[in-house]
Image (cartoon, rainbow, N blue to C red):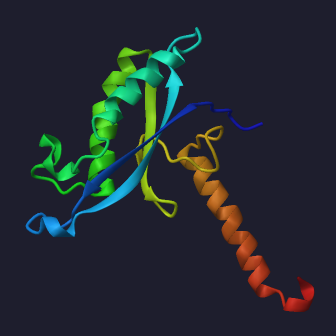
Amino acid sequence: MTEKHEAYLYQVTFNAMHNMVVEDPRKMHAHTFRVGMYVTEKQDDHPVFLSNEKLLNGYFSRLQGIRLNELPMFKDVIPTLENMGDFFYQDLKPIFERNGMHLISLEIGDSPVSVYCVGERLLLGDVFNLTLPDEIEAYCDRVKHRYQTASSKTIGEL
């Protein structure tokens, strides 16, 4: 049996604007950002969900409807998904620690197909499968083998 990993996923959305060309504010555009945070408990008792939800709603509500380029943390750094994700991950990690939880990874997306992930572990599959690097390698080998085997067969054999 493989090692079991469990985590909780907190998700928050907020609407904000940003622009990639700082010198031209007319290039500003809006997104509905979705942030997902995978956390584990540091204690044996049940986590304080309402406390964390209230904290996260307060944290992200300050970003609602504003131009991200005007925030102090993005004055000298363009608020790309990568820069936003890195900042939120580093900023939220100690907040979760103080609340008895460990932030494993954070995802941020500005569209259904564009998501950036930063953290300690890659997530392969879903929140219930926080995969270790050797397990990822084994999975990739199995997929690679499956496709190599399938590509060597003719259409009639499939």
As rendered, which of 145 and 8 lies closer to the eye?
8
The x, y position of residue 115, in whole percent, is 45, 57
Q: Residue most toward the right?
A: 156
Q: Position of residue 35 (x, y in %)?
A: 43, 44
Relative vertical location of residue 52 with respect to residue 13 in this rendering, above or below: above
Residue 21 vs residue 107, the one in the foreground: 21
* Residue under the image location 16 percent in, 43 percent down: 71
Query: Which quadrant of the figure contains the C terminus?
Result: bottom right
Is the residue 124 above or below the residue 152 in the image?
above
* 120 to the left or right of 151: left
Residue drawn at 68 percent across, 32 percent down:
4
Question: In which quadrant of the rendered view does residue 63 lie?
Answer: top left
Q: Position of residue 12 (x, y in %)?
A: 46, 38
Q: How many marks?
A: 0
Residue 73: % across, % down: 16, 42
In the picture as drawn, the residue positioned furthest to the top comes out as 45
Q: State left or right for residue 62 relative to residue 7.
A: left
Residue at 15% from the left image edge and 53% from the top image edge: 77
Residue 116 in view of the camera: no
- Does residue 39 appear in this view? yes
Q: Nearer the viewer, residue 118 or 149?
A: 118
Judge by depth and name the residue closer to the eye, 38 or 57.
57
Q: Quadrant of the N terminus?
A: top right
Q: Is residue 109 above or below residue 144?
A: above
